[in-house]
Amino acid sequence: MMTISDLEDLNNLQILDMPALRVAKLIEDEIFIPLASSNAILTSDLIKKYCQKIKRILESAYTDLHALSAQFWSRPIEKPVIIEEVLSALVLKFLSEMNDSIYIGKILYGMKNVKFTELVYILKKMIVSKELKSFNISAFILFSSFKYLKTLCPETLFWSKQTATIIENFNKYSNPFIEFLSRNSIFVEYLKNICHIDDDTFKNQLNTALRNTFLVKDRDLNWYGVDAFTTYDRKIYIKNFNTQNPVLDKGATFYVLLHELCHFFRRIFCITWEDSRRCKTPKEFIDNRWQKEGGNIFEVKYFGKRHKFLNEKASNFLLFQDENLPREQYSKLFASENKLKGDVYVSLKRGSSPGKKDVVELSGCLISRYREDN
Ligand SMILES: [Zn+2]
C-alpha cells in the first residue's frame, strides 16, 4: 500500500543495484514473464521445468541473500530497518517457500492466471514506502507464505494495485479509547494477562500502541476484505470506518482495536523480527472448535462469537455501558444486542446493504481472514 508521496518517490526512484532486486528480476525473467506470456497449458513436465529453474535461482542467490536476510530477522523491531536486508529476507523467503511448496503446481497456475509479473515493482514500492513500510513488510511476509494458497489471488491483485491510500494518526480516538478502557476493566485485565504485566507497564504499552495506530482509508482495506492488521513490529492499521454514523464508526473502531491489541500485547516482549514472527497464541478449545488466532479467541470470549457486523444497539452497549459486568454476562448481553431483524444473515457489503446506516460490516483482521495461527 502506498501514500501519494510514496507514489511520487516511486516515479523518481533511480535504478538501484541490490542483490535482492537482481534476484527478483531473474525470477521475473525466468519464471513469471514466460508463465504469463505463454499460451501453453501448464503440464506436469512444464511444472517440473519451472521447479528446476526455481531451484537453480535459489542455489545461485542463496549466498548473496542469506547473510543479509539473517541480519534482518535478528534486527530489533524498535530500530529502523535496513532496506537491503529487508528485501533480501523477503526475496529469500519467497524463493525458498516456492521451492519447498507441495502446492507449486497450483501456485504457478495461480500466478499464470493473474498474469503476475511484477516482483521488482513490489520491492520498489517497499523501498519508497514511509508510514506504510511496516504494513508492507508484514503483508509481504504473509503474501509469500505459500502454505496459505487462498492468500495468493487477493494478494497478487492487492500488490499490483497502483492507487494511493490516505492514512491518519489515531489522535481523535486515543483519549476516548483510554477513557472507554477505564470503564471496562474486564478488557484491561484480559490484555494484561496475555503478557502478565502490571498496571504501569500496561499504561505505557497502551500509549505506545495508540501512538503506533493508524487509520487507513476504508476503501483500501475493504478492497483487501479486512478491517485491520497488526504488523510484526507492532504497528496497528485500522480501517477508517466511514458510515456517516459516528456511534457506529467509533464502536466498530473500538471493537476492531480490542482485537488488534490482543496481537500487540502478545508481542510486547519480542525483541527482534524473528521473535515476533515466532510468537504464537496458545490454541484454545472454545465455541466448539480449536481457535488459534489471538484476536478471535478474545472476540468469542467477550462478545459471544466473531461478529460479522455491528448494529447501533450493540455499538451503544459497547461504548456506553458502565456497569462492571462479569465476562459471561457481558458477552451474552452484547451478543443479544447485536442482531439483525430476521434470523438470516445477509451480506452487508456495499450495494447489498438495506440502505440504513445502522449497521457496519466487520471483516476480521488480515491474519484471521487468511490464516489462523497467530
Ligand atoms: Zn487477528
Image (cartoon, rainbow, N blue to C red):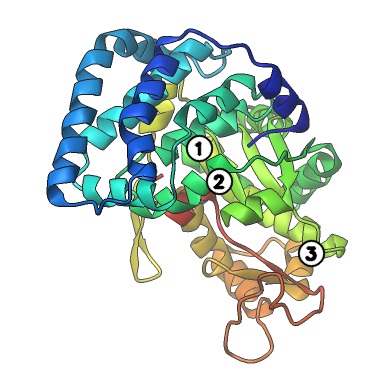
Mark 1 vs 2: CB contact within 8 A: yes
Which residue is identified by label 2? 158
What residue is at 50 percent from the left and 62 percent from the top? 301
Mark 3 vs 1: CB contact within 8 A: no
Q: Tell me which amino acid carries mark 1.
A: Ala
Question: Could you tell me how far apart the alpha carbons at marks 3 and 1 are, in whole angstroms?
Answer: 28 Å
Q: Is residue 26 left or right of residue 270?
A: left
Mark 1 residue crowding within 10 angstroms, few (<14) / some (14–19) / many (20+)? many
Compare marks 1 and 2 and give the one earlier in the sequence.
Answer: 1
Q: Quadrant of residue 331?
A: bottom right
What residue is at 37 percent from the left and 39 percent from the top? 280
Question: Could you tell me how far apart the alpha carbons at marks 1 and 2 are, in whole angstroms?
Answer: 10 Å
Q: Is residue 315 left or right of residue 157?
A: right
Compare marks 2 and 3 and give the one earlier in the sequence.
Answer: 2
Residue depth check, mark 2 versus mark 3: number of the one nearer the observer: 2
**Which quadrant, please, contains the N terminus?**
top right
User: At which x and y percent is residue 221?
Assistant: 64, 50
Q: Secondary structure at mark 3?
A: helix
Disc marking residue 139: 1
Disc marking residue 248: 3
Compare marks 3 and 1 and give the one earlier in the sequence.
Answer: 1
Q: Tell me which amino acid carries mark 3.
A: Leu
User: At which x and y percent is residue 219?
Assistant: 71, 53
Residue depth check, mark 1 versus mark 2: number of the one nearer the observer: 2
Mark 3 residue crowding within 10 angstroms, few (<14) / some (14–19) / many (20+)? many
What residue is at 23 percent from the left and 51 percent from the top? 42
